[in-house]
Image (cartoon, rainbow, N blue to C red):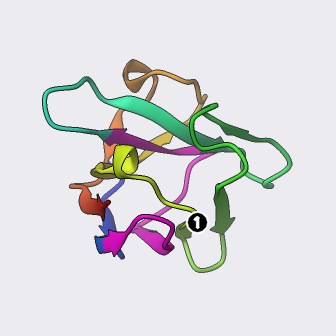
Amino acid sequence: QVPMVESGGGLVQAGGSLRLSCAASRLTYAMAWFRQAPGKEREFVAQISWSSTNVYYADSVKGRFTFSRDNAKRTLYLQMTSLKPEDTAVYYCAASDSGGFYSKDYPYWGQGTQVTVSS
């Protein structure tokens, strides 16, 4: 198990910024953020490798979101800028020893934090 707790969500106006954090008992090789909007399937947001050498983003957030990790603090960060109403969702951090771009690739999940972007 990899207990993880997300924080930093909230209500923000379109164009604003938020920084999400995910504190974990341990970090695995690949860590990721996913999100799920009401009535939609959970979707990939970003993935980062152990050394942060490889960071991948969904096209919908590329250039606006920045994913980073601090292995010493066992914490992930998702800096979100230029937020849009369509970014509204519950955001989850996820952990995997191998990585991937699909929910099924990640066995460990946080409980999620709500992000709401008003227009």
Residue at the outermost right position: 53
Residue at the outermost front position: 119
Image side of residue 86 versus residue 95, left or right? left
Looking at the image, how many numbered discs can be counted on the residues? 1
- Residue 5: horizontal and vertical position, in percent? 30, 67
- Residue 91: horizontal and vertical position, in percent? 33, 52
Image side of residue 55 versus residue 97, left or right? right
Q: Nearer the viewer, residue 68 or 45?
A: 45
Seen at 26% across and 61% down, the residue is 116
User: Is residue 40 positioned above or below 116 on the image?
Assistant: above
Instruction: Let me know if residue 89 is in the magenta part.
Output: no
Quarter of the view holding residue 54: top right
Chief secondary structure of the magenta span? Answer: strand
Seen at 62% across and 41% down, the residue is 47
Image side of residue 115 versus residue 111, left or right? right
Label 1 CA crowd tier, 10 Å (few <14, some 14–19, many 20+): some
Q: Which region of the structure is painted magenta? A: 12-35
Check disc 1 and report the residue beneath it. Answer: 81
Helix, strand or loop under label 1: loop
Seen at 78% across and 54% down, the residue is 52
Tag 1: residue type?
Answer: Thr
User: Is residue 113 positioned above or below 62 on the image?
Assistant: below
- Residue 73: horizontal and vertical position, in percent? 58, 80
Residue at the outermost left position: 39
Q: Nearer the viewer, residue 96 or 43?
A: 43
Seen at 13% across and 27% down, the residue is 39
